Amino acid sequence: MDFPSGRLDLFMIDISEPRDNDLRVVVVVADDPGPFAPHDIGGGLIFEAREIKGGPASPVYEILWLDYVAYAVRNESFTTLGPGEEPKPDRLFTVAASPFLDYVAAATFATDDFPGPLTQWSLITQNHCLDVVSTEPPQVRRLERSEYPTSRLAIEHGLG
């Protein structure tokens, strides 16, 4: 798989179903941090921080799951780790057991027998957590500039 490893600052800038039951996600690697500037967090507390975002030269990746079983997107601010679960070193990884896999087992008739061995993939970005259950790993490729989405989020990251 051609997805960068390690703890990256990623932003999901597009999510769609290009064909029935195919899921396409586009992420930008936020490697163009802005300058440090003072930020007032209230109560007279001011600290120096910089905005994390992508820029025109930031790598952009497409992650495509063909024929997924289920997916869910959560606001990263409300996501918790399960019992005994620890943060992962990579931003795109597989999960062996989870409440989402339990939900899929209860809410669908998909099993390892049909349509085939199920795997949960998790993608963690700065603002979203995506969980996808599928029988095949996603196809990953780096996009060329001419392929960048024109979503509001892409434009906010200097890609439009």
Image (tube, rainbow, N blue to C red):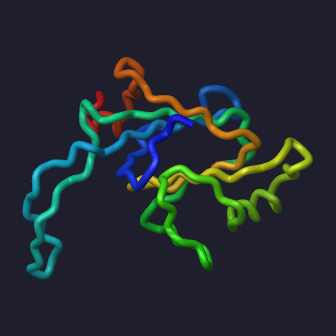
Position in image of residue 146 (x %, y %): 37, 18
User: If the image is split into quadrants, where does the C terminus sit?
Assistant: top left
Instruction: Please state which of residues 87 and 34 is positioned toward the viewer in this rendering.
Output: 87
Query: Which residue occupies the foreground of this view, 149 or 7?
Result: 7
* Quarter of the image where one finds residue 67: top right
For the residue pair 17 and 99, the one nearer the viewer reads as 99
Q: Is residue 16 something one can see in this rendering?
A: no
Above or below 120: residue 76:
below
Residue 113 locus on image (x, y percent): 91, 47
**Residue with the most extreme bottom position:** 43
Point 35% across, 34% down: residue:
59
Residue projecting furthest to the right: 113
Q: Where residue 75 sits in the image (x, y, percent)?
A: 47, 59
Looking at the image, is 8 positioned above or below residue 82?
A: above
Q: How many marks?
A: 0
Q: Is residue 31 left or right of residue 20?
A: left
Specify the quadrant of the image occupied by residue 47.
Answer: bottom left
Spot occupied by residue 37 in the image (x, y as percentages of width and height): 8, 59
Vertical placement of residue 116 versus 141, above or below: below
Residue 53 appears anywhere in the view: yes
**At 41% from the left edge and 28% from the top edge, which residue is drawn?**
149
> Quadrant of the image for the N terminus?
top right
Residue at x 69% of width, y 67% of height: 99
Q: Give me the residue at 11% from left, 78% from top.
A: 45
* Residue sitting nearer the eye, 58 or 127: 58
